[in-house]
Image (cartoon, helix red, strand yellow):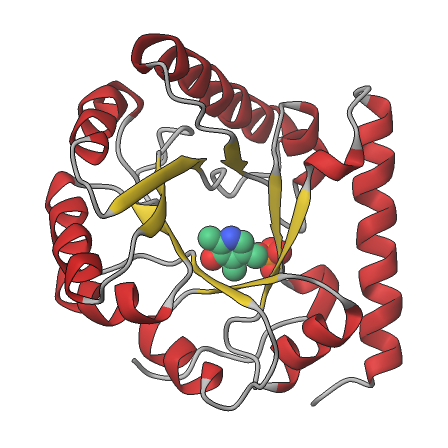
């Protein structure tokens, strides 16, 4: 069921207030933390509501779903891919997304670089790191991050904005805290080693955004708290 815009707007106000409160607790400026509205599985109404509210960016998990949705939405949004990307979809992803957050292998980096070149653009990426050592999650191991960044920095059609992680599903808040602290220290180490800013830390979702902001998140990816529970994913 499609909620009213007013319900969505109240949800969005509440999420922004939560972000502001989390920033305040950690002595951070809330302008440092952006809100990515995760519109996956929802119809075109979801990105339309986000744009109408004034949010700048939406996140999608599946390339084809996003391409189809984007064609229906006439709003100046940035579209970011946050779901696992198969290398055979790299060309489509590079043509349609403003940023790909789920880059976790050298092979995928190479494919995206070639695809961005073909599309005549420089593609922004984040390196997805499995900072919670979760066997159920995609993402490069923490140990592999320096080698992955080295490859990424050698590719002229990619721009590496920073890192992304997803905390393991767990009832224990300490697990999310540890995951986010790991990503933050990984970023700090890479920054020192390679001399690149890697300013973006994409971490935190509906259930764990406070912990992510405390650990230095600069972008939280929120679906449920904005749009309600998701309908089941359509078959791929
Ligand atoms: C679905 C998803 C989100 C949003 O999750 P919510 O718990 O609904 O806020 C964030 N990040 C990624 C990578 C996702 O797949």
The foreground one among 42 and 198 is: 198
Query: Residue at point 82% right, 82% down?
Result: 5
Query: Residue at point 80% right, 62% down?
Result: 12
Looking at the figure, which quarter contains the N terminus? bottom right
Query: How many dots with numbers?
Result: 0
Query: Residue at point 40% right, 16% down?
Result: 191
Left or right placement of residue 133 versus residue 149 in this view? right
- Asked if residue 228 can be seen in this view, the reply is no
Q: Position of residue 222 (x, y in %)?
A: 64, 56
Left or right placement of residue 217 versus residue 32 in this view? left
The relative height of residue 172 versus residue 6 in the rendered view (above or below) is above
The relative height of residue 165 versus residue 45 in the rendered view (above or below) is above
Classify residue 20 by image quadrant.
top right
Q: Position of residue 205 (x, y in %)?
A: 61, 48
Query: Residue at point 69% right, 73% down?
Result: 51
Classify residue 128 by image quadrant.
top left
């Amino acid at each position: 069921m499609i909620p009213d815009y007013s319900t969505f707007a109240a949800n969005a106000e509440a999420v922004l207030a939560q972000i502001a409160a989390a920033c305040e607790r950690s002595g951070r400026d809330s302008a440092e933390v952006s809100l990515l509205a995760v519109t996956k599985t929802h119809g075109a109404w979801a990105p339309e509501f986000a744009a109408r509210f004034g949010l700048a960016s939406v996140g999608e998990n599946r390339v084809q779903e996003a391409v189809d949705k984007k064609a229906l939405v006439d709003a100046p949004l940035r579209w970011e891919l946050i779901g696992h990307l198969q290398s055979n979809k790299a060309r489509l992803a590079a043509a349609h997304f403003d940023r790909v957050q789920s880059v976790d292998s050298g092979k995928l980096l190479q494919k995206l670089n070639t695809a961005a070149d073909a599309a005549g653009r420089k593609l922004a990426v984040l390196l997805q790191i499995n900072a919670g050592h979760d066997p159920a999650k995609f993402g490069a191991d923490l140990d592999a991050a320096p080698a992955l960044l080295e490859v990424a920095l050698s590719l002229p059609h990619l721009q590496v904005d920073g890192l992304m992680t997803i905390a393991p599903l767990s009832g224990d808040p300490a697990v999310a805290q540890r995951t986010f602290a790991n990503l933050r220290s990984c970023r700090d180490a890479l920054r020192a080693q390679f001399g690149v800013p890697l300013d973006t830390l994409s971490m935190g979702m509906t259930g764990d955004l406070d912990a992510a902001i405390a650990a230095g998140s600069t972008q939280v990816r929120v679906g449920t708290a904005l749009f309600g529970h998701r309908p089941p994913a359509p078959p791929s």
